[in-house]
Image: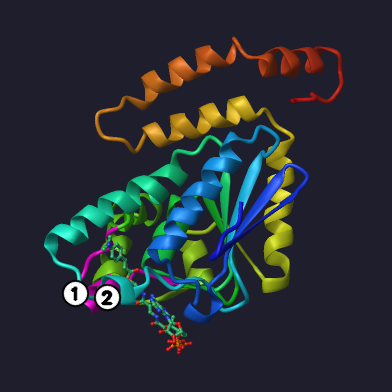
Amino acid sequence: MDYNNIIVSEEGNIAMITINRPKKLNALNKETISELHAAFNDLNEDDSIRVIILTGSEDKAFVAGADISEFADFGVKKGSKLAQRGQELLFDFVENLSTPVIAAINGYALGGGLELAMACHFRVASSNAKMGLPEVTLGLIPGYGGTQRLPQLVGKGKAMEMIMTASMITAEDAKNFGLVNYVVSQDELIPLCKKLAIKISRNSSTAISSAIKTINANFKDGVNGFEKEIKQFGKCFGTDDFIEGTTAFLEKRKPDFN
Ligand code: DAK
């Protein structure tokens, strides 16, 4: 499929999506959000793809936010409608994908950009990365899940401070707050993400998909995560991967999950 704003590449069973609007610091316009939805959907349905890495093009930005030129003239109705549509189409969609998604934060991750990174399953940042939710400087609050996912990752007090002050934090601070898992140089960013992806890809994809659903259940209103875990755990016993994993252990060999 041809895209105008993103580049999709594959290397073995790892896919990479690069948001490619460098002149606008990869800001998310409507078309980019639709293209990202289509790409994530296609890759998720492709059984040969085990991990997706999401990054921004060039070395300045992951995503510098939602494209401000597109929402400057919105009213109340249009704003809430599009926030809901965006959350369903991209942010909640990525969070609930069965294929693991790693955000490789290669520069500014602001507003909708940080919200997108937070919707990914985990994050790795380059040392030049800067992160923040500056929406209150525009008379807005984060509208793509930021008020919910930031406190889950950094705790309520730090999230309140970051959102109220609209300050950018460094990659090192983000690591100390639990927002990103690793900080490396720009050159090492994609290689480290690929290394992690290869490690993940050797494990059972059905078990990983169950783990994503179960971990996410902890953060969903009205869902009992422990009950979800029992259900998903039971389901694992009915999979080919369970037979292969246990057989390989007993035969003292490495499992070969298809
Ligand atoms: N949108 C559109 N264009 C952007 C952009 C953005 N978010 N960020 C940067 N650009 C553009 C700049 O306008 C400039 O374009 P030209 O003037 O060259 O045409 C180009 O990218 C390069 O940017 P700068 O010249 O500003 O580069 P600097 O190195 O000087 O500064 C910066 C880098 C990241 C500090 C600065 O660009 C900046 O402050 N950018 C804006 C950051 C920001 O406030 N982002 C928005 C956060 S609010 C909604 C749902 C969610 C949201 C909104 C609506 N609905 C459902 C309706 C979420 C909102 C947000 O994300």
Image-based side of 55 in relation to 10, left or right: left
Residue ID at (57%, 16%): 236
Going by the numbered disc 2, the residue's amino acid type is Thr
Label 2 to label 1: alpha-carbon separation: 13 Å
Q: Picture coordinates of residue 190 (x, y %)?
A: 69, 62
> Magenta segment, which residues?
131-143
The disc, 2 or 1, on the residue closer to the chain's N-terminal end is: 1
- Can you say which quadrant of the picture contains the C terminus? top right
Q: Picture coordinates of residue 201 (x, y %)?
A: 71, 38
Q: In this view, which residue lies farthest toward the left? A: 76
Residue ID at (53%, 46%): 40
Image-based side of 144 in relation to 239, left or right: left
Nearer the observer, disc 2 or disc 1? Answer: 1
Q: In this figure, which residue is indicated by the disc labeled 1?
A: 139
Indicate whether 126 appears above or below 178.
below
Q: Picture coordinates of residue 74 (x, y %)?
A: 19, 69
Going by the numbered disc 1, the residue's amino acid type is Gly
Q: Picture coordinates of residue 24 (x, y %)?
A: 47, 79
Indicate whether 198 appears above or below 168.
above
Q: In this view, which residue lies farthest toward the bottom? A: 23
Place residue 256 in its image quadrant: top right
The verdict on residue 139 being magenta is: yes
Q: Which mark is residue 165?
A: 2
Q: In this view, which residue lies farthest toward the front? A: 2
Quarter, ligand 1: bottom left
Indicate whether 233 appears above or below 143.
above
